[in-house]
Amino acid sequence: MAITPREDGRSEIGFDLRERILRATICSVAERGYAGTEVSEVVQRAGVPPETFERLFNDKEDCVLAAYDWVVDLILVRVAAAYELGRTSSWSDGVRRGLEALLEAVAEQPGVARMALVEVPPISPEAHARYRAALERLASLLKGGRDHLDLDEEPPPQVELMALGGAEVILVDEVAAGRADQLPARMPEILFAILVPYLGPEDAAAEMHAAAAA
Amino acid sequence: MDTGGETPTRLPSGRHDLPPDIVINSQRDRLMSGMAEAVAATGYPKASVEEICSRAGVSTATFYELFRDKDDCLAASAETLLGEVVTIVTGQYSADKAIRYVIRDAIAAVLALMAQRPAAAHLIFVNGRYLTPAARQAYTSGITLLLSLLDQVRVEADPNLESPRSAARAAVGAIEMLIRSEILAGRAEQLPAILPQATYAALVPFLGREQAQAMADEAAANPPHIELTPFGRAHL
């Protein structure tokens, strides 16, 4: 029996053609980068006719951005869950657990991490906006928690951006250099980078040493 | 993004007595500005030579006389911008200035330069780290310059503080994030306003919250005066 896909890419028997194309796109961008990814190769890998691709996506960029949203969402849900779990003991514990989850995800799938951190953001202003949106989600996680921090002084405005910027630059540098697998081992110093604008160097270093010992 | 007025003024058309090298430099400058504007508008993959030339008001034939291809023009733009950043940052050194003030003023100088040239700011801070190897090299050199300043502030820091080696890279990353955020929000022209936060981010891992905040407060109350040439171009 022939499978007739519906407009949304779900066939009558629930086969998700859209998801198959997105998976193929992720593999292709992870292996060949954005520039090296071609729609013809993606549809072949996904095992769908080119018309299905054309019905579901405007072009390569549209499809890559959809794939991007999907992988980023999977990673961020994982990070948020770990953060909330850790936060039951303390805010910095939540940050540590969330960071661990992020670095594990990156090390498990370096190609996907490369796609998310290095390949996709520069392709267009729209892609940058998606990347920003992902950072905003992390920033609101951090902000939600630090309201409960008992700091003697208010942290400066945009402290979330500082914290994220410190960690992000290390992630991007390492993933771009092909060292994603070494990131989990660097968790304590990345934790320092996130905590230092809130806590100052003494307390951030104490958390770093505790994380290294744990 | 409003990049009005950023492209260097076109020379008057028709006969003129300007020496050929001035004409060529002007065309090069305009093409490099056109490159920055095109990348800010569409991203590098979609910025075509035609688009760059049309923004610059220069023919594609001239483009190919001056540059091998798009990558070559990008590399030249990145190197030129790096040259400007290096000149303006190193200009903040003086023998009687404590290193924390050199750092604050170097940040202020970069912010002032970028505020004057939003498209260039976008090229460096939004796209710089993702571009071709040659362009990325220029970006990395600029970052390394700031890192070397931050490593010097460790000398002024309490020797018992144990910031990890990567703390300087993270601090510069924090500043980059602050800058990128302003640019993407369309506030490149107002970049000097974030000097207090950027100063705090640079110094907090080494000097602690109290001293970093004091430096930030001082930067807010009494921002340093940065001299820029009309185009923000040290070589003009």
Image (cartoon, helix red, strand yellow):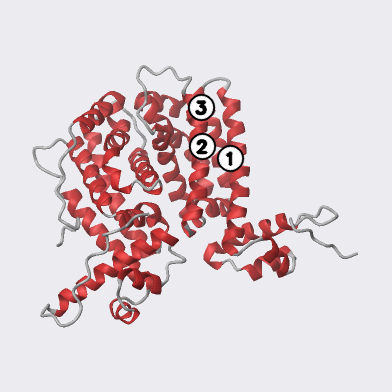
The dot on residue A76 is: 1
Residue B43 seen in render: no
Give the percent coordinates (x, y) of residue B190: 29, 44
Q: Residue at x 58, y 36 (%)?
A: A79
- At numbered mark 1, what does the secondary structure look like: helix, strand or loop? helix
- At numbered mark 2, what does the secondary structure look like: helix, strand or loop? helix
Q: Amino acid at mark 2?
A: Leu
Q: Residue at x 50, y 24 (%)?
A: A91
Give the percent coordinates (x, y) of residue B58: 30, 75
Q: Which residue is mark 2?
A: A138
- At numbered mark 3, what does the secondary structure look like: helix, strand or loop? helix
Q: Is residue B210 above or below residue B80?
A: above
CB contact under 8 Å: marks 1 and 2? yes
Q: In the figure, is residue B138 to the left or right of A208?
A: left
Q: Which residue is mark 3?
A: A144
Q: Are marks 2 and 3 on the same chain?
A: yes
Q: In the figure, is residue B205 to the left or right of A169?
A: left
Q: Chain of mark 2?
A: A
Q: Amino acid at mark 1?
A: Leu
The residues bearing labels 1 and 2 have C-alpha atoms spaced at a distance of 8 Å
